[in-house]
Image (cartoon, coloured by chain):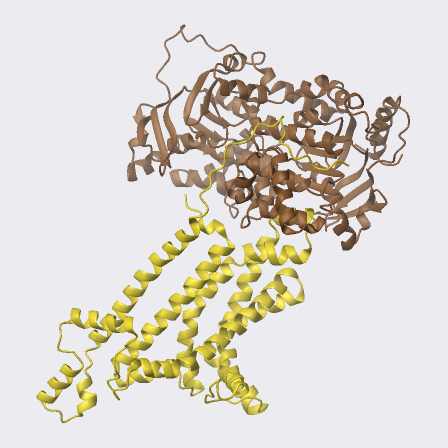
Amino acid sequence: MNIAGNIVEFTGRTAALRPRPAPSLPPLLSLRCLTIADAGGQTLVDDVGFDVPRGGTIGIVGESGSGKSLTCRAILNLLPPGLRVASGSIRYGDHDLTRLDRRGWQALRGVDLAAVFQDPASYLNPSIPVGKQLAEALRAVSGLNSRAAHQRALALLRRVGLADAEGVFNLYPFELSGGMAQRVLIAIAISANPQLLIADEATTALDVTVQAEVLALLDELRREQGLTLILVSHDLAVVAQVCDHVIVMQGGRIVEAGTTAQVLRSPAHAYTRSLVDNHARYSIDAVGQSLPPAPDPAAAPAPRPLLEITNLRAAYGNRAVLDGIDLTVQRGEILGLIGETGCGKTTVLRAILGVVAPETGTIHFNGQDISALRGRELRRFRQSSQIQHAFQDPLRSLDPDLTVAGSIGEGLDIRGGIGAAERAERVATALAAVGLDPALSVRLPRDLSGGQRQRVIIARALAMDPAILLLDEPVSALDAVNRIHVLELMRRMADERGVAQVFISHDLGSIAGITDRVAVLHEGRIVESGPTADIIANPAHPYTRRLVQSVLRLEDGAVSRPSPAEQNPPVPPQRAAIPGEN
Amino acid sequence: MSTVAVQPSSAVAPPAPVRRPRKASRWQVLRSLALIVVPVFVAATLITFLLGQASGLDPAAGVAGDAASPEMVARIRHDFGLDRPVAIQYLAWMAGLARGDFGVSWFNGVPVAHLIAQRLPISLSVAGAALVIGVVLGSVLGIAAAVRRGSWLDRGVTAFASLASALPPFVVAIVLILVFSLWLNLLPAAGYIPFSEDPAGWLRIIAIPAAALSVDIVADLSRQLRTGLVTALSENYVTGAVVRGLSPRRILFVHVLRNGAGPALSVLALRVPMLIGGAVVTETIFTMPGIGKMAADSALRGDVPVVQGTLVVSILIVLACNLVINLLLGLLQPATRRKD
């Protein structure tokens, strides 16, 4: 898409939003023609412009690499080394943030401008109790004495929903859950009463129930403190939940912008349409429509399952992790295993792989008890490569010094018995099967995108012709588009090649679309299991009900929210996010 | 703009209660360190004692001369307690150590503790000064290289570190003597002056040996510190601290240094024993009457109690240094205390 097209599209959209009186106050933040380039001169963000009205909530949506995070980092002057603002301006009040010196930033960052990010615990110093870090931030910007800072830190921790503030104050970051860490970061971010809060994928990878709570907290703080909020996410539903306006970015450009309701109801750009459609196709709402009806179990006696886990118990030290698990997986079936962080779902996979030794219970694969295998027998069974796995973090699951072909072919080499030509062919076939160009086979993992890496890992598993594939959160690190690709690939593998799969997720929505059956794991037990559609339609266990309710739906944001003017009268009239100068 | 209200939010469910086992952990650290230090000390001293036994050396030859009669030898052995069973000798020796009694020299009958007390300050002066130079210079260079990574300074530090770690201390010592004593005639090249007699003279005389011994520390420390800090600087919590408005100085010295200094401290713990080993060489080169030289001379003379005594003292020094560094690591980085 060229620049002209860009502007035309926006002018139309802006015009449609004009009935309101012209704003009396200038926008809080105003980006014009922002272009970000790397050291080689390649443009990563191209001609991005929008206004953020005081008190407004702007969501920026796009896949990874769309430039949404870079844009935010440019606002905070935190671009990664080698990247720079090539042209354009970022106006905040009287300042052009692209030209601010160090002293100028000292007065703004942490004071007027605050931010929270994905993977919150990593944004805290691992060696210092979190309360001290909050107090430190308070003292750095407000000059409070240490006693006053301590008191205020406790008040802030309580404010963000950490009831046991004294206890949390002395905890180290690694002792916090993801949700608690994000609350602490939010407490730090609002500690200086900032004007603008940027939340960059702040709820990504949190458990769904926690995500909903954190979003609610952000929304509440925004109203209470008159914060202006920029919410960045790859998930349209997250943005729809909180924001009045949405900006959709793709390939470093804004492709669409407007009020949330408009963008969701009548997406104008093809990319936005695909985002909305994908959400409709692979989400909790899609269940029951897209799936073939589950076969009636009474119709035919079930064949002996491919994988049968009976009364599995496992513990780390004294802490019981699995407390009597029974699971079966049939050939060609996708079983979803859902539960929040720490419920033991990954331990189930590790037990199947023979990495965790079960205390009691058996794991039968094809009639053979694989939990009893030891030493040479275990190694021989592993070399038969009938069980393959793909873990959550695609980058760390690949040897950084092995090319794609090297990683995929390694298992073939270990199994042996094929020549170099056949090996190359199998690698190419596996890559083609996951929809990757075989030309990528010479690349190293760091030269691939997140979605490509995850597909390489699945290709590595597929090349071994497994009977069953164990997938641990295979799509939670991926943006919407890549997620869809991987999900569709997995469904095809089950349907066309009969590969059974155990698919772990903390998010019911992300696996609802492709699983045949779902088992809900809660505190080391399976609290509920059955055909996916049944579980979602009639969740019996309270925990399952909470999971189903926590799933974000697009409609929530667009339809059920009152318009911002009604709920927030003192805030000046909202103005549409408009693109750069026209 | 409103200030933050203090009452807890009603919309947000309180997270799970927090477990609090912190207070006991400092004692746990001390206990676990003691569990390391005591067995190491016992094992090391046992080996030291058995080495003396295994050497088969006997004071009689040295004391009585070549023409000693068997009765005389037996009497000398009895005087030194060598006719008792080995286990009894060991226990007596350990009991002596506990009282600060290291036995007497077989060579001249002087108490070993007295010999060591005379010479230890010399060795500690040199080793201590080398440690100070090494830590200060190594830290400064390492921090500077990390902060200005990619600059000529960074490359210079790396080049220096590679060169220095390839040079053994005695080579450096000889070069320093050549330059500072012989050519520039600035510093003395040999001997020792106690601090209590002439502080300035003391400093001048230990300057070259300390500098020679410190080169390895500077090189290792700056290299490890640079790597550790560069890694820490790219961590998200640094970005977080920037966003919170902390000053660059505070970010570097509070947040980055604390997390990036771990490997450097561990390397330092490994370097301290080498410092003591290096003292043997440097004290010989600079003809300083330290315990390194004494141990070497006594070993050549077969004076077992003196060698054992110096070994015990060295073991104590090494253990003490390791203890200090481990405590420091535990204080800096609570994550090392974490047990699963």
Between A250 and A563, which is closer to the camera in this rendering? A563
Residue at 24 percent of width and 85 percent of height:
B106
Question: Which image quadrant is residue A332 in?
Answer: top left
Q: Image point 39% across, 41% down: which residue? A: A414
Can residue B237 be spotted in the picture?
yes
Residue placed at 76% from the left, 33% from the top? A226
Residue A77 position, x and y percent, is 74, 47
Rendered yellow, the chain in question is B
Residue A500 appears anywhere in the view: no
Asked where in the image residue B86 lies, by quadrant, the reply is: bottom left
When the figure is inspected, residue A479 is found, relative to residue A266, above or below; the finding is: below
- Where A331 falls versus B205 (above or below)? above
Q: Where is residue B139 drawn, in percent x and y? A: 57, 66
The residue located at (36%, 32%) in the rendering is A314
Question: Closer to the camera, A447 or B253?
Answer: B253
Which quarter of the image is occupied by the N terminus of chain A?
top right
The brown-coloured chain is labelled A
